[in-house]
Each structure stands twice: as C-alpha cells, then as structure tokens.
C-alpha cells in the first residue's frame, strides 16, 4: 500500500453493481428490471448490429489509432475541425485524460457537491485537491464556484445536465460564467446527456470554443446513442488542447467495434429521435407517479429522475431489488434521502411504479 501514489491510496473504490444474472440468482427473481445506470432502454439499433457483424472479420488487426472516420463524421455533423477532437473509451476516458494532461499534485480542481463520481476520482488519483462547492437547489452554484477559484485552481468540471440531479444550467448562466473564469483555468463542460435537452434550450457550447480556448466539451455515445457497453466518447476543444491530450492518450483507446458502431450511430437520426421520444414519455410517466403520491423529485433534463423518498432510501432500494427492480441509491453523492431511477421502456417504468406503490 505504501508504494501507491498518495492520491490513489486515499481513493474509495468505485461502487460497481453485481452482474444482473448473479443478482437474479441471489434474490431468486428473474427478469430484473434495471433502471440503475442511465442506459438506453431501446438496446442497439439494427444498423449498429449489422455494422458490428461486418467489423468482426477485421478484429485481428489493430484499430485505426486516430479514429479517422469517426472524427471526420463528428467534424461534419457539428461544424468543428477534426483537430479539435480527442476520442475516448467512453467519455470517462477523456475526462481522465484531461486531468492527466493538465493537472498535477499542486493543483485544485473544482466541482459541485452533487457532481458525477468520476470528477473527484480522476482528481484524487493524480494527487490533486478536489474542491466540492455546495450546490444550489441541487444544481451548480456558478457564483460559488467562481468564488472558489484560487491561484492553484487548474480545472472546473460542470455537467450539464448534471448527474445524479438532472439539473440544467441555462445558456445565459453558462455564458456569464465562462466570461468570468480566468483563462488559465480549464472549464470541462460535460454534456453526456446533451441529446435529451430540447433543442431550443441547448447551449451553443461548441461555438463557444472559438471564444474560449480554456473550454472543453465532452460528449458520449453511451446515453441517447445507446452504446454504453461499447465505450465511445469524445472531447472537443481548442486544437492546441486536443493536440496535447492526443499526445498523452493511449494510441488504441477506442477499439474497432466501438469506432465503427459510433460512426453508424451518429448517422442514425431515427434511432436518436426514438431515444429522445421514449425518454420524454417515460419521464412523464414517472413524474405523474411522483405527483400522484406527493413525492418530491428533482426536475430532470437527463434520462433519469431523482426522487426524494426520505430516510428509508437505503432500505427502499433493497426492497425494490427484492421486487425485481434495480435503481441507484445516491447517498454517495450526498443525497441520502433520494433514489435515482433511469427512464426505461413504458413496461419497465410500470414495474418500478407498481413496486413503489406496493412498498410505500
Ligand atoms: N458524464 C456524466 C455526467 C455521466 O453521468 C456519465 C455516465 N454515467 C459519463 C460522463 C460517462 O459516460 P461514458 O463514460 O459511458 O461516456
């Protein structure tokens, strides 16, 4: 233990769930409904499935280390240049990469109180100091985050929408914030749930890159594009920043299957629209359930809803498991009285609602 880096020694292990089959065996239930990891309930599209089949024959070869085709497609779709893109094994990979590229033990990294678990993780692994800023109405308190900046601050993580709260910052609020951040502080805008945000409310985050060389925007194929198991994500930034990150990156950090699947998924507008529509309908279903029973919930822009269930949250999580429904306790995110429920297919949401109605 003494040989490990100080930051790593103090890390808490990531709380991964058991494989569903193991859980089913343990609990003696079948067909567990999994609403715990903000995955896409539609499964992969038939287009992605056949592209994966076609890719199998090439798997004895290394993947394209630069992701030429995927970067070209991303650049075309979003009006950016390929040299602004850093690809990753899921967006977690690029979130870690940015920390590894720019942060050292002397630095402070700011994030919100209810921030995505990977931000403190990558900060601590480097031995840097994480600064968790108290939230406002569960969301980011941007003024408090600005006030937390010191001469040692190197980076600020902001998820928009945020996980696990689903809170969302307006374009105006973010624009005002960016204008006040000193240029030596990098702002990582994590847009993992971007596609679920109504178009008219989305921030012009990629256009802002022209004005702010210290801004980095991450996105993923794990959510609305439905490729969580394949691991595909990317960061868009100033070309100089992308150049540095691409130097520090492992050459084959995206594999051939995930590269190909992401290329196909990016073109699959029908699937994307279906994802968003299924999510909107499921969100209505869960919100109606909460309102019917007078349960408080945090209005969400993501593919999940975080519901206040009181002191019995931990117990309720276990009881739901025994009813065959797995959700996410969020006590580790300083939300001990809430449970986070991912939006599923209508029948999956129903299973959750039925189980809750039985238990409450
Ligand atoms: N950012 C946020 C805010 C998330 O909630 C998640 C997924 N839980 C990710 C990033 C990482 O997703 P992935 O690594 O699958 O791209």
Image (cartoon, rainbow, N blue to C red):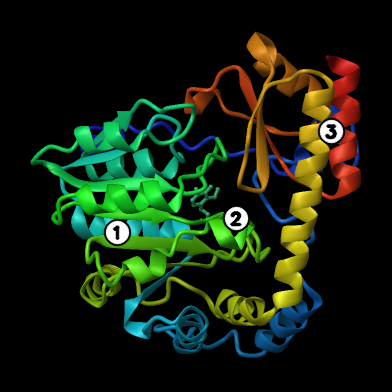
Q: Which one is in front, 293 or 151?
A: 293
Foreground mark, 2 or 1, reads: 2
Q: CA distance from mark 2 to mark 1?
A: 25 Å
- The quadrant in which the C terminus is found is top right
Q: State which mark lies toward you, 3 or 2.
A: 2
Q: CA distance from mark 3 to mark 1?
A: 38 Å
Residue 21 shows in the view: no
Query: Disc 2 vs disc 1: Cβ atoms closer than 8 Å?
Result: no
Answer few, some or many: residues within 10 Å of disc 2's Cα (few below 14, many 20 plus, some between 14 and 19).
Answer: some
* Spot occupied by residue 291 in the image (x, y as percentages of width and height): 79, 25
Left or right relative to 337: residue 252: left
Residue 225 lies left or right of residue 148; in this view the side is right
Residue under circle 2? 197
Residue 215 seen in this snapshot: yes
Residue 20, position in %: x, y? Answer: 76, 43
User: Residue 239 appears in which quarter of the rendering?
Assistant: bottom left
Q: Position of residue 30 (x, y in %)?
A: 91, 39
The relative height of residue 87 versus residue 143 in the rendered view (above or below) is: below
Residue matched to label 1: 98
How many C-alpha atoms fall within 10 Å of the one at disc 1: few (<14), some, or many (≥20)? many
Q: Quadrant of residue 306?
A: top right
């Amino acid at each position: 233990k003494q040989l490990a880096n100080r930051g790593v020694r103090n890390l808490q292990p990531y709380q991964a769930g058991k494989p569903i089959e193991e859980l089913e065996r343990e609990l003696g239930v079948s067909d567990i409904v999994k609403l715990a990891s903000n995955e896409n309930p539609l499964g992969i599209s038939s287009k992605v499935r056949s592209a994966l089949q076609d890719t199998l024959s090439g798997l004895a070869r290394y993947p394209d280390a630069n992701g030429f085709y995927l970067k070209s497609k991303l650049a075309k779709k979003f009006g950016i240049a390929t040299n602004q893109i850093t690809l990753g094994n899921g967006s977690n990979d690029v979130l870690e990469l940015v920390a590894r590229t720019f942060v050292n033990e002397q630095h402070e990294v700011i994030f919100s109180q209810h921030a995505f678990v990977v931000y403190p993780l990558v900060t601590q692994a480097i031995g840097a100091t994480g600064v968790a800023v108290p939230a406002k109405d569960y969301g980011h308190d941007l003024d408090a985050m600005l006030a937390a900046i010191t001469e040692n601050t190197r980076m600020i993580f902001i998820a928009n929408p945020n996980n696990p709260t689903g809170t969302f910052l307006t374009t105006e609020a973010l624009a005002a914030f960016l204008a006040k951040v000193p240029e030596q502080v990098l702002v990582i805008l994590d847009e993992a749930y971007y596609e679920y945000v109504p178009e008219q409310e989305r921030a012009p985050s990629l256009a802002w890159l022209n004005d702010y060389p210290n801004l980095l925007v991450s996105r993923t194929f794990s959510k609305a594009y439905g490729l969580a198991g394949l691991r595909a994500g990317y960061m868009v930034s100033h070309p100089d920043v992308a150049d540095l990150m691409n130097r520090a990156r492992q050459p084959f950090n995206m594999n051939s299957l995930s590269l190909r699947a992401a290329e196909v998924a990016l073109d699959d507008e029908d699937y994307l629209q279906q994802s968003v529509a299924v999510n909107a309908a499921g969100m209505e279903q869960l919100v109606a359930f909460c309102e019917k029973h007078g349960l408080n919930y945090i209005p969400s822009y993501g593919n999940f809803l975080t519901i206040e269930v009181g002191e019995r949250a931990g117990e309720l999580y276990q009881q739901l498991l025994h009813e065959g429904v797995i959700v996410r306790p969020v006590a580790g995110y300083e939300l001990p009285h809430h449970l986070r429920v991912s939006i599923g297919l209508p029948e999956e949401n129903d299973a959750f609602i039925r189980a809750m109605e039985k238990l409450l």
